[in-house]
Amino acid sequence: MGGNFSPTPEQREAIDARGSALLISAGAGSGKTRVLTERLMSYLTDERAPCDVDDFLIITYTRAAAGELRGRIISAISEQLRADPKNRRMRRQSVLAHRAEIDTIHSFCGRIARENAHALGISPDFRIAEESECAAIKTAVAERLLDARYERLDEYKSFSRLVDTISPGRDDARLAELMLDLYGKLRSHYDEERWIARRLEDLRLGASSDAADTAWGRLILKKARQIAGYWSARALLVLDGLDPGGEEYRLFGACFEYARSGTDAFLAASQRGWDDAAAAARFAFPRAKPCKKGLFDDIKSEWERCRAGLRELAELFPASSEEISEDISAVYPVTEALFELVTDFSAEYLNEKRRRRIADFSDLEHFALKLLCDAETGSPTELAAEISARYREIMVDEYQDVSAIQERIFGAVSRGGRKLVAVGDVRQSIYRFRLAEPSIFLEKYRSFRDILPDSVEARDSGPGSENAQGRRAILSRSFRSRGSIIDAVNHVFSLVMSEEFGELDYTEREYLTPGPDKDGGPPVELDIISLVTDDGGEEAADGYAPKLDKRECEARFIAARAKELIASGFILPFDGGRRANYSDVVILLRVKKHARIYRDALRELGIPAELPEAEAFFDRPEVETALALLSVIDNPRDDIALIAALRSPAYAFTPDELAEIRLRRPDGDFYDALILYADSDEKSRRFLTELEDFRALAPELGAERTLWLLYNRTELPALVSAETVNGAERRAGLMRLIEYARGAAATGRVSLFDFLRFVRKLREHNAGTDAAPASYGGTGAVRIMTAHKSKGLEFPIVFLADMSRQFNFTDSREKLLFHRELGVGP
């Protein structure tokens, strides 16, 4: 098996464990793909009870990961055949491997749905619609639904109140956006109707209860007790360090004694009800006695922090229990109307998709759940039992990012989880915003027992011997990163990760350890850039220009540091001792929108740079050019679009020519100035003549055909193809825009205006980035990418940038908050 692969003891445990559910907690670079491959091969080569490769269902997160794993399995089988060419069993496996079920969860669900379409009442030849097409259909359905509500306001009394509450301005765009957002979140639930009913019941009961007895009140009181308990312990710690007869006790003793007694009183009051807790949370802090500057500053600072921390308690109780009950009573009908609106939208959107014989990815999961789980009891159906019997084992990768509905599907086809091998790393869970539930992984991590040395006897168990007690294997050795990097990661994680903050205590049990050839390495470098001079001025330090944005300062520092490293002939000690070059350098960002700042800083110093995934599709130059041309056809008085169209390769007006045009009419629209200038300029006349042709034909042609006409007349695809850098990719971008126009036409609304509005909505929701090429720059350049995109990759020199940003609390300021257990909070 696997050539020269020598598994670590932990990897061997994960490969050999049999007879129960298995959780493999695989840290970054711990060789999980190799472990999965070797585990499967150990089944195929088992002399007592060999299995076939198609006896397994293997679920990966992406098709690319599925392809990689299939390739690894085929290579491992080929190795076996090279060693024993006459092995008939391995020859059979080499054929079966190409049709083995190694795919994404959506492909698996789609296959089940098509095979059982009759039971779902859908057409088996449905297709999966693209995101852009679904977005267009959702918008059209939402507009029809809201129009129908307005026409029948007498029947929907609470709808008027909902509109006044959510969208009190000039239009109801906020309400439509909120409805679509809530619909998307609800789709992660396996029973949307029951969830809505429970949340409304929570509101109904909350309106007549003490606030402390509601789900929200209990959560707030829990947090308040944590705050009080923490500062009570801190106060006691300070008091224990004070000499009762000393000067520091005379000055500060009463303060910390009050903090102890006050927090104890609050903890007792919090058990009696909301109003008692609220009253006890309003502390009358004593004033610390004055002392000389510089004397006991540490104790003084601790008291200031304690007082500020305890003030948070009062902020948690902004109203009485009676006032909160009144608020809940007022919120109930509005929330009920919103849920009713979302429910109706869900039904109409589903009907529209069925009419078009399309489905989206969430539909596939719900189709599969309906077929595999009983709607009332949640227990597996006969079909689920039949599918489960097909497989010896169900292996699921990236398990930390599964949702509740996916967990139910996996449970249904794995005998309640007994056949399940779940692989993941909760520290790498990044899809909570897509409603992934890392708590599912953590629950198994906490409840499953470690594999003991004498427990591998279950390896000899045959099919059907699975027991309910799951086991876990922890792969903590990283073969990807140097020891110095791993030490830094362990240090930071141990300080910031806890069950309260990160849902997991990061102890030595969770520490990563370096692989056998990964010890040592250059130390991790922490650079802190001060933007304030010694005299407190605003001028940036270290010679950088004054009043620069902090991100620009950081970008310039990174560019200078990268240049210094390469110019100094920095040697890569673990890569044959060669000198580093710019292609060895990568800058990792949290989000892509600021990538151009770093690229510009690099280019200022003559450093080549590329943005592999930073330029969203609609921000690419050739796409912006085409959209500008369309915007001018739709509205020639759009000055920005008009100037962009004139400056484009299609018309190539120079800055001097544009300045002369503006001088003809300094005030007013640029279009009027262009008309005046065209009286004496042939180039301008040709542009205006062509523009009028486009404007005359566009209403009849629609967006897609207008784009084709535009491309043919201006030869824009040929012009961008002729560019020296990425010509083929730029032409592909223009063709991709045609596909978006075709997707917008799926709504039946194909006018140029509708398409441009459709594009604006996609840009607002950051869609369309899937069309960006994997590489959008030359070679030998510094690469700039998000940390997310770098997952699984290795680079010799890494700058982890933009680390000074605060956590993003935008969601907490929305008009409607969503929580999968606490419901919605308007």
Image (spheres, rainbow, N blue to C red):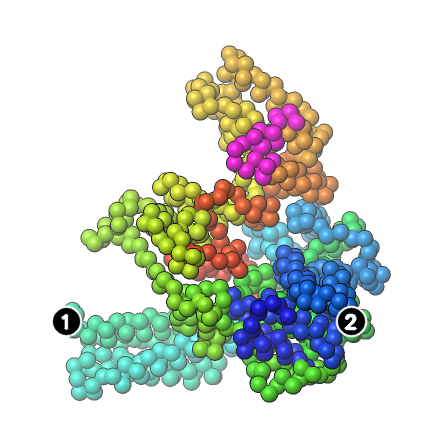
Q: Is residue 173 above or below residue 404?
A: above
**What x and y, as percent, mark residue 550?**
35, 50
- Give the residues in magenta: 712-731
Placement of the N terminus among the 4 image quadrants: bottom right
| Crowding near the residue tagged with mark 2, few <14, some 14–19, many ≥20 C-alpha atoms within 10 Å | some
Quarter of the image for residue 705 reads top right
Placement of the C terminus among the 4 image quadrants: bottom right
Q: Element type at marker 2?
A: loop
| Residue assigned mark 2 | 390
466 displayed left or right of 313: right
Please state which amino acid type lies under the numbered disc 2: Arg
Q: Is 211 included in the stretch rendered in magenta?
A: no
**What x and y, as percent, mark residue 722?**
56, 30
| Residue assigned mark 1 | 292
826 displayed left or right of 494: right
Distance between the alpha carbons at the discs numbered 1 and 2: 80 Å
Q: Is residue 356 above or below residue 183?
A: above
Quarter of the image for residue 465 reads bottom right
The answer to whether residue 819 is visible is yes
